[in-house]
Amino acid sequence: MTAVLTLNQKRLYEQAKSIQDKDKLIVVVKNDAYNFGMDLAFDAFYAAGVRGFATTNLKEAIELRKKSNQIMILLLDPSTEFDLIRQHNITLTVPNLSFYTQYRNELEGIQIQLVFKNLLNRFGFEKASEMITVLDDNHMTVTGIWTHFAFADELSDLRYDQEKANWVQILDSLSSYVENLTYIHAQNSASYIRDGLLDQHTHLRAGVFAYGTRPYIEGLDTGCAKQTIKVSATVKDIIQISKGQSAGYSAAFVAKKDTTLAICDIGYGNGILRSRAKHEVMINGHFYPIAVMMMSHLLIEVDDGVKTGDKVYLYNDYLRLDDFAAKGVGAFSEQMAGLNHQTFDIQIIPLE
Ligand SMILES: Cc1ncc(COP(=O)(O)O)c(C=O)c1O
């Protein structure tokens, strides 16, 4: 028995549907759908009624187009691969006025969306007047405008109010154009949960929440987002070490008392973050601390209740990615991105 990564496609579908049934979702599927796996994720999201997909990667965008002609695929980052973009009917984000000026001829015939820079200070137009230059150009096919809030996840940071106000001002300045646009979107998961879909917006543009994870945990129960993955491994052996004895490379663990250690077949080589080792695992419904994480093994401080062959959970409904994110293990995307699928037995809980 090796380490097991369980991908709950059914829950992914249910989570996406619970959002999509209320408000239209553009789901962010970058980095192989947050490392859930694009094929499984796409089928779940599509079955849930989602028809908007966003990624930063042109290769992923092209793969998505092969799956369906019925979806809008937004490339969030700029690209100059205009022929490929046109050929696969990808919607391209135009990042600023100088990009538009430089590539105006190449952009003809491509669906584009304009991004407002706002406080994130990544790509983006600086002012409404610059966006109007493009919106007024009859040779451009502008289907939408968007921005990204940099502070929505920080509940006590007032700059979220500021970036919302900046964006509302942009929408006001573009009011005569807004009604002709199919896509007006700004909100990530946190912003959507905090405020619902903002006025004039056609879609939210979510990642974490769509994948069954809470973007923050204050005031939210686990029922609003049912975790869509599990990670488990197996106790391969039980050993006893005496007080003062060490275990692991370079005596990574030194026993403060006589200790029972369970040796389990998972480690950072599977892509588990090292910071995850500061927190407990679950065996037979009880929590136990990790003594040492190695590349392919965990040493876990256990008691008599644990025996060889028992299942060890690192992530399940009680060991949640969002709780670990709040404890500083790493963002949801960091914990997910690391998981090395090739090192796991993959178990899928399918749509039906
Ligand atoms: C441009 C953009 N929009 C939306 C999202 C989704 O954010 P969240 O996962 O917080 O919902 C991301 C995530 O990185 C993003 O970069």
Image (cartoon, rainbow, N blue to C red):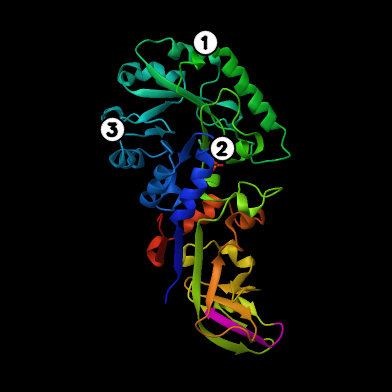
- Closer to the chain start, of discs 1 and 3, is 3
Q: Secondary structure at mark 3?
A: loop
Residue 176 badge: 1
The type of residue carrying mark 3 is His
- Give the CA distance from mark 3 to mark 2: 26 Å
* Magenta residues, dominant SS class: strand
- Label of residue 88 in the image: 3
Foreground residue, 321 or 348? Answer: 348
Q: CA distance from mark 1 to mark 3?
A: 30 Å
Q: Residues within 10 Å of mark 2 (few under 14, many from 20)?
A: many
- Measuring from the top left, give residue 130's x and y in whole percent: 50, 14
The boundaries of the magenta stretch are 256-263
Q: Position of residue 237 (x, y in %)?
A: 51, 85
Q: Residue at (34%, 31%) from the top-left corner?
A: 90
Determine if the C-beta at disc 2 is less than 8 A from ligand 1: yes
Which one is in front, 211 or 325? Answer: 211
Classify residue 128 as left or right of residue 303: left
Q: Is residue 223 visible?
A: yes
Tell me the residue at 61%/89% (across/down).
240
Closer to the camera in the image, 15 or 323: 15
